[in-house]
Amino acid sequence: MDLFSPLMQPAVIIPLLAGLCIVTLVLAIGLMANRRGGSAESRLDIFTRKGSKSASSQAIEIWKDAADANKRNLVEQLVPKIPSLDKIFQQAEINIKPSAIIMLSGALAVVSTFASLAFGVPFVIAIIPGIIFGFIPWGWVIWMRNRRLQKFATQMPDAMDLMARALRAGQSLQAAIHVISEEMPSPIATEFGRVYEEQNLGVSLEDAMKSMCERVPSLDLKFFVTSVLIQRQTGGDLAEILDKISYVIRERFKILGMVQALTGEGRLSGNVLVALPFVILLAVMHLNYEYAETLWTTEEGKTMSVYALIMQLLGAWCIRKIVNIKV
Protein backbone atom coordinates (compact mmCIF):
# COMPACT_ATOMS: atom_id res chain seq x y z
CA MET A 1 0.00 0.00 0.00
CA ASP A 2 1.36 3.41 -1.01
CA LEU A 3 2.07 5.74 1.89
CA PHE A 4 0.54 8.80 0.18
CA SER A 5 -2.42 7.04 -1.46
CA PRO A 6 -4.85 7.88 1.41
CA LEU A 7 -4.00 11.57 0.95
CA MET A 8 -4.96 11.53 -2.74
CA GLN A 9 -8.61 10.71 -2.13
CA PRO A 10 -11.21 13.40 -3.04
CA ALA A 11 -12.58 13.30 0.51
CA VAL A 12 -9.17 14.50 1.72
CA ILE A 13 -8.15 16.81 -1.12
CA ILE A 14 -11.37 18.88 -1.14
CA PRO A 15 -11.21 19.88 2.57
CA LEU A 16 -7.50 20.67 2.21
CA LEU A 17 -8.14 22.95 -0.76
CA ALA A 18 -11.02 24.62 1.10
CA GLY A 19 -8.80 25.17 4.12
CA LEU A 20 -6.04 26.66 1.96
CA CYS A 21 -8.56 29.03 0.36
CA ILE A 22 -9.81 30.16 3.78
CA VAL A 23 -6.25 30.71 5.06
CA THR A 24 -5.36 32.69 1.93
CA LEU A 25 -8.48 34.82 2.30
CA VAL A 26 -7.73 35.55 5.97
CA LEU A 27 -4.16 36.52 5.14
CA ALA A 28 -5.30 38.79 2.32
CA ILE A 29 -7.89 40.52 4.53
CA GLY A 30 -5.33 40.97 7.32
CA LEU A 31 -2.72 42.44 5.00
CA MET A 32 -5.27 44.79 3.43
CA ALA A 33 -6.45 45.94 6.87
CA ASN A 34 -2.90 46.61 8.03
CA ARG A 35 -2.14 48.50 4.84
CA ARG A 36 -5.27 50.64 5.08
CA GLY A 37 -4.65 51.32 8.76
CA GLY A 38 -1.11 52.48 8.05
CA SER A 39 -2.18 54.78 5.21
CA ALA A 40 -4.97 56.25 7.33
CA GLU A 41 -2.59 56.95 10.19
CA SER A 42 -0.11 58.58 7.84
CA ARG A 43 -2.83 60.83 6.39
CA LEU A 44 -3.96 61.83 9.89
CA ASP A 45 -0.37 62.62 10.85
CA ILE A 46 0.01 64.85 7.81
CA PHE A 47 -3.32 66.54 8.52
CA THR A 48 -2.50 67.22 12.16
CA ARG A 49 1.17 67.94 11.38
CA LYS A 50 2.49 65.38 13.83
CA GLY A 51 5.61 64.30 12.02
CA SER A 52 7.70 63.29 15.03
CA LYS A 53 7.03 61.35 18.20
CA SER A 54 7.94 62.53 21.65
CA ALA A 55 10.06 60.53 24.03
CA SER A 56 7.06 59.55 26.14
CA SER A 57 5.18 58.22 23.11
CA GLN A 58 8.26 56.24 22.10
CA ALA A 59 8.46 54.81 25.60
CA ILE A 60 4.80 53.81 25.50
CA GLU A 61 5.36 52.19 22.10
CA ILE A 62 8.33 50.18 23.41
CA TRP A 63 6.34 49.03 26.43
CA LYS A 64 3.37 48.00 24.29
CA ASP A 65 5.65 45.96 22.03
CA ALA A 66 7.03 44.15 25.07
CA ALA A 67 3.61 43.59 26.68
CA ASP A 68 1.96 42.39 23.45
CA ALA A 69 4.78 40.06 22.42
CA ASN A 70 2.72 36.98 23.35
CA LYS A 71 -0.66 38.36 22.15
CA ARG A 72 -0.54 37.65 18.43
CA ASN A 73 -3.53 37.72 16.16
CA LEU A 74 -4.44 35.01 13.66
CA VAL A 75 -2.44 36.49 10.80
CA GLU A 76 0.74 36.78 12.90
CA GLN A 77 0.36 33.19 14.09
CA LEU A 78 -0.08 31.90 10.55
CA VAL A 79 2.81 34.00 9.24
CA PRO A 80 5.31 34.25 12.13
CA LYS A 81 7.86 37.02 12.17
CA ILE A 82 11.24 35.55 11.24
CA PRO A 83 14.23 37.70 12.21
CA SER A 84 16.78 38.46 9.52
CA LEU A 85 20.05 36.56 9.41
CA ASP A 86 22.02 39.78 9.72
CA LYS A 87 20.27 40.64 13.00
CA ILE A 88 20.84 37.13 14.37
CA PHE A 89 24.55 37.27 13.52
CA GLN A 90 24.77 40.77 14.99
CA GLN A 91 23.17 39.58 18.23
CA ALA A 92 25.58 36.63 18.30
CA GLU A 93 28.53 39.02 17.66
CA ILE A 94 30.03 36.69 15.04
CA ASN A 95 32.35 38.13 12.43
CA ILE A 96 31.20 35.61 9.82
CA LYS A 97 28.91 36.26 6.89
CA PRO A 98 25.61 34.32 6.77
CA SER A 99 26.52 33.05 3.29
CA ALA A 100 29.60 31.34 4.75
CA ILE A 101 27.51 29.55 7.36
CA ILE A 102 25.02 28.49 4.67
CA MET A 103 27.80 27.08 2.48
CA LEU A 104 29.41 25.31 5.45
CA SER A 105 26.08 23.82 6.52
CA GLY A 106 25.34 22.55 3.01
CA ALA A 107 28.84 21.10 2.64
CA LEU A 108 28.61 19.24 5.96
CA ALA A 109 25.18 17.88 5.07
CA VAL A 110 26.30 16.61 1.65
CA VAL A 111 29.60 15.14 2.88
CA SER A 112 28.00 13.35 5.86
CA THR A 113 25.21 11.95 3.67
CA PHE A 114 27.60 10.59 1.02
CA ALA A 115 29.90 9.25 3.73
CA SER A 116 26.98 7.31 5.22
CA LEU A 117 26.07 5.96 1.78
CA ALA A 118 29.68 4.90 1.24
CA PHE A 119 29.48 2.72 4.38
CA GLY A 120 26.40 0.97 3.00
CA VAL A 121 23.78 2.82 5.04
CA PRO A 122 20.39 3.09 3.25
CA PHE A 123 19.48 6.47 1.82
CA VAL A 124 16.57 6.93 4.23
CA ILE A 125 18.90 6.50 7.20
CA ALA A 126 21.79 8.40 5.56
CA ILE A 127 19.67 11.56 5.48
CA ILE A 128 19.62 11.71 9.28
CA PRO A 129 23.40 12.31 9.68
CA GLY A 130 23.17 14.88 6.87
CA ILE A 131 20.49 16.81 8.72
CA ILE A 132 22.36 16.59 12.03
CA PHE A 133 25.73 17.72 10.64
CA GLY A 134 24.06 20.38 8.49
CA PHE A 135 22.45 21.90 11.57
CA ILE A 136 25.71 22.02 13.56
CA PRO A 137 26.83 25.47 12.22
CA TRP A 138 23.39 26.95 12.85
CA GLY A 139 23.29 25.40 16.29
CA TRP A 140 26.62 27.06 17.04
CA VAL A 141 25.27 30.44 15.89
CA ILE A 142 22.13 30.05 18.02
CA TRP A 143 24.25 28.99 21.00
CA MET A 144 26.51 32.03 20.61
CA ARG A 145 23.49 34.32 20.33
CA ASN A 146 21.76 32.86 23.40
CA ARG A 147 24.98 32.99 25.41
CA ARG A 148 25.58 36.65 24.55
CA LEU A 149 21.99 37.64 25.35
CA GLN A 150 22.11 35.71 28.62
CA LYS A 151 25.38 37.40 29.57
CA PHE A 152 23.85 40.78 28.73
CA ALA A 153 20.89 40.01 31.00
CA THR A 154 23.14 39.02 33.92
CA GLN A 155 25.12 42.27 33.54
CA MET A 156 22.05 44.49 33.65
CA PRO A 157 21.73 44.77 37.49
CA ASP A 158 25.39 45.78 37.89
CA ALA A 159 25.05 48.28 35.06
CA MET A 160 21.97 49.82 36.71
CA ASP A 161 23.81 50.15 40.03
CA LEU A 162 26.83 51.71 38.31
CA MET A 163 24.66 54.20 36.44
CA ALA A 164 22.78 55.09 39.63
CA ARG A 165 26.05 55.79 41.47
CA ALA A 166 27.29 57.91 38.56
CA LEU A 167 24.07 59.97 38.63
CA ARG A 168 24.31 60.46 42.39
CA ALA A 169 27.89 61.66 41.89
CA GLY A 170 26.56 64.51 39.77
CA GLN A 171 27.24 63.18 36.29
CA SER A 172 24.77 63.47 33.44
CA LEU A 173 22.92 60.56 31.87
CA GLN A 174 25.19 60.64 28.82
CA ALA A 175 28.26 60.53 31.07
CA ALA A 176 26.76 57.62 33.04
CA ILE A 177 26.23 55.70 29.77
CA HIS A 178 29.87 56.39 28.90
CA VAL A 179 30.94 55.07 32.32
CA ILE A 180 29.14 51.78 31.60
CA SER A 181 30.86 51.49 28.23
CA GLU A 182 34.25 52.07 29.88
CA GLU A 183 33.93 50.11 33.13
CA MET A 184 31.66 47.17 32.28
CA PRO A 185 32.76 44.15 30.22
CA SER A 186 31.30 43.13 26.88
CA PRO A 187 28.55 42.74 25.64
CA ILE A 188 26.79 45.41 27.69
CA ALA A 189 29.76 47.76 27.31
CA THR A 190 29.59 47.35 23.53
CA GLU A 191 25.88 48.17 23.32
CA PHE A 192 26.01 51.17 25.67
CA GLY A 193 29.19 52.36 23.97
CA ARG A 194 27.33 52.31 20.67
CA VAL A 195 24.55 54.42 22.21
CA TYR A 196 27.15 56.92 23.43
CA GLU A 197 28.85 57.09 20.04
CA GLU A 198 25.53 57.57 18.24
CA GLN A 199 24.81 60.55 20.48
CA ASN A 200 28.18 62.06 19.61
CA LEU A 201 27.29 61.70 15.94
CA GLY A 202 24.05 63.66 16.41
CA VAL A 203 21.48 60.92 17.05
CA SER A 204 19.02 61.73 19.81
CA LEU A 205 19.12 59.72 23.02
CA GLU A 206 15.60 58.41 22.41
CA ASP A 207 16.45 57.04 18.96
CA ALA A 208 19.76 55.58 20.15
CA MET A 209 18.11 53.72 23.03
CA LYS A 210 15.27 52.51 20.83
CA SER A 211 17.84 51.14 18.38
CA MET A 212 19.55 49.34 21.26
CA CYS A 213 16.22 47.70 22.18
CA GLU A 214 15.87 46.49 18.60
CA ARG A 215 19.39 45.03 18.64
CA VAL A 216 19.02 43.35 22.04
CA PRO A 217 15.65 41.60 22.60
CA SER A 218 15.65 41.88 26.40
CA LEU A 219 12.63 42.66 28.56
CA ASP A 220 14.85 44.13 31.29
CA LEU A 221 16.40 46.50 28.76
CA LYS A 222 12.93 47.58 27.63
CA PHE A 223 12.08 48.37 31.28
CA PHE A 224 15.21 50.50 31.56
CA VAL A 225 14.71 52.38 28.29
CA THR A 226 11.05 53.00 29.03
CA SER A 227 11.89 54.37 32.49
CA VAL A 228 14.57 56.68 31.11
CA LEU A 229 12.37 58.04 28.33
CA ILE A 230 9.45 58.69 30.68
CA GLN A 231 11.71 60.28 33.31
CA ARG A 232 13.12 62.72 30.74
CA GLN A 233 9.58 64.00 30.11
CA THR A 234 8.06 63.90 33.59
CA GLY A 235 11.10 64.31 35.83
CA GLY A 236 11.95 62.44 39.01
CA ASP A 237 14.87 60.74 40.68
CA LEU A 238 16.34 58.50 37.97
CA ALA A 239 18.90 56.99 40.35
CA GLU A 240 16.14 55.68 42.61
CA ILE A 241 14.30 54.28 39.58
CA LEU A 242 17.44 52.45 38.47
CA ASP A 243 17.89 50.99 41.97
CA LYS A 244 14.36 49.58 41.83
CA ILE A 245 14.92 48.15 38.35
CA SER A 246 18.12 46.49 39.56
CA TYR A 247 16.28 44.99 42.53
CA VAL A 248 13.48 43.65 40.33
CA ILE A 249 15.94 42.06 37.91
CA ARG A 250 17.87 40.34 40.69
CA GLU A 251 14.68 39.00 42.27
CA ARG A 252 13.51 37.71 38.90
CA PHE A 253 16.80 35.85 38.48
CA LYS A 254 16.27 34.24 41.88
CA ILE A 255 12.80 33.04 40.89
CA LEU A 256 14.15 31.83 37.54
CA GLY A 257 16.80 29.78 39.34
CA MET A 258 14.14 28.18 41.53
CA VAL A 259 12.06 27.33 38.45
CA GLN A 260 15.09 25.81 36.71
CA ALA A 261 15.79 23.66 39.78
CA LEU A 262 12.19 22.47 40.07
CA THR A 263 11.87 21.65 36.37
CA GLY A 264 15.29 19.98 36.07
CA GLU A 265 13.84 16.48 36.40
CA GLY A 266 11.24 17.17 33.71
CA ARG A 267 13.83 18.57 31.30
CA LEU A 268 16.12 15.59 31.85
CA SER A 269 13.23 13.17 31.35
CA GLY A 270 12.28 14.93 28.13
CA ASN A 271 15.82 14.67 26.75
CA VAL A 272 15.97 10.97 27.62
CA LEU A 273 12.58 10.23 26.06
CA VAL A 274 13.49 12.08 22.87
CA ALA A 275 16.86 10.35 22.46
CA LEU A 276 15.74 6.86 23.53
CA PRO A 277 14.04 5.75 20.25
CA PHE A 278 17.05 6.74 18.14
CA VAL A 279 19.49 5.01 20.51
CA ILE A 280 17.39 1.84 20.46
CA LEU A 281 17.24 1.97 16.65
CA LEU A 282 21.05 2.17 16.41
CA ALA A 283 21.41 -0.69 18.90
CA VAL A 284 18.96 -2.90 17.00
CA MET A 285 20.70 -2.09 13.70
CA HIS A 286 23.99 -3.18 15.23
CA LEU A 287 22.60 -6.38 16.76
CA ASN A 288 20.15 -7.48 14.05
CA TYR A 289 20.22 -5.35 10.92
CA GLU A 290 17.71 -7.50 9.01
CA TYR A 291 15.15 -7.04 11.76
CA ALA A 292 15.58 -3.24 11.76
CA GLU A 293 15.55 -2.78 7.97
CA THR A 294 11.86 -3.64 7.82
CA LEU A 295 11.21 -0.07 8.99
CA TRP A 296 12.34 1.32 5.60
CA THR A 297 12.02 -1.61 3.22
CA THR A 298 8.30 -2.39 3.71
CA GLU A 299 5.27 -0.16 3.28
CA GLU A 300 4.02 -0.92 6.79
CA GLY A 301 7.43 -0.07 8.23
CA LYS A 302 7.59 3.23 6.34
CA THR A 303 4.14 4.17 7.58
CA MET A 304 5.08 3.30 11.16
CA SER A 305 8.34 5.27 10.89
CA VAL A 306 6.58 8.40 9.59
CA TYR A 307 3.89 8.33 12.27
CA ALA A 308 6.45 7.55 14.98
CA LEU A 309 8.58 10.52 13.94
CA ILE A 310 5.53 12.81 13.93
CA MET A 311 4.46 11.66 17.38
CA GLN A 312 8.05 12.01 18.60
CA LEU A 313 8.18 15.64 17.49
CA LEU A 314 4.74 16.31 19.00
CA GLY A 315 5.77 14.79 22.32
CA ALA A 316 9.01 16.81 22.41
CA TRP A 317 7.04 19.99 21.75
CA CYS A 318 4.56 19.18 24.55
CA ILE A 319 7.35 18.46 27.04
CA ARG A 320 9.08 21.69 26.10
CA LYS A 321 5.88 23.68 26.66
CA ILE A 322 5.45 22.07 30.09
CA VAL A 323 8.97 22.65 31.43
CA ASN A 324 9.57 26.11 29.93
CA ILE A 325 8.01 28.51 32.43
CA LYS A 326 8.40 32.19 31.68
CA VAL A 327 9.39 34.41 34.61
Image (cartoon, rainbow, N blue to C red):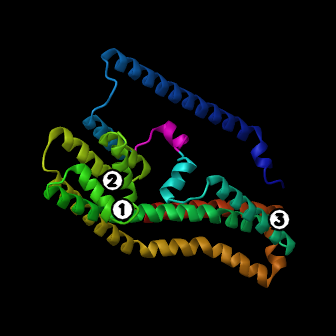
Viewport quadrant of the N terminus? bottom right
Callout 3 amino acid = Phe
Q: For the residue labelled by badge 2, is the local secondary structure a helix, a strand or a loop? A: helix
Q: Which residue is mark 3?
A: 123
Q: Earlier in the sequence, mark 3 or mark 2?
A: 3
Q: Residue at x 50, y 59 (%)?
A: 93
Where residue 126 appears, x then y in whole percent?
Answer: 78, 67
Residue 76: in magenta span: yes
Q: Which residue is mark 1?
A: 153
Where residue 212 appears, x then y in whole percent?
Answer: 38, 49
Q: Which residue is mark 2?
A: 221
Res 70 visible: no
The magenta segment: 70-81
Of the two numbered discs 3 and 1 in the rendering, the one whose residue sits closer to the viewer: 1
Of residues 138 and 317, the one nearer the viewer is 138
168 relative to 261 in the view: left or right: left
Of the two numbered discs 3 and 2 in the rendering, the one whose residue sits closer to the viewer: 2
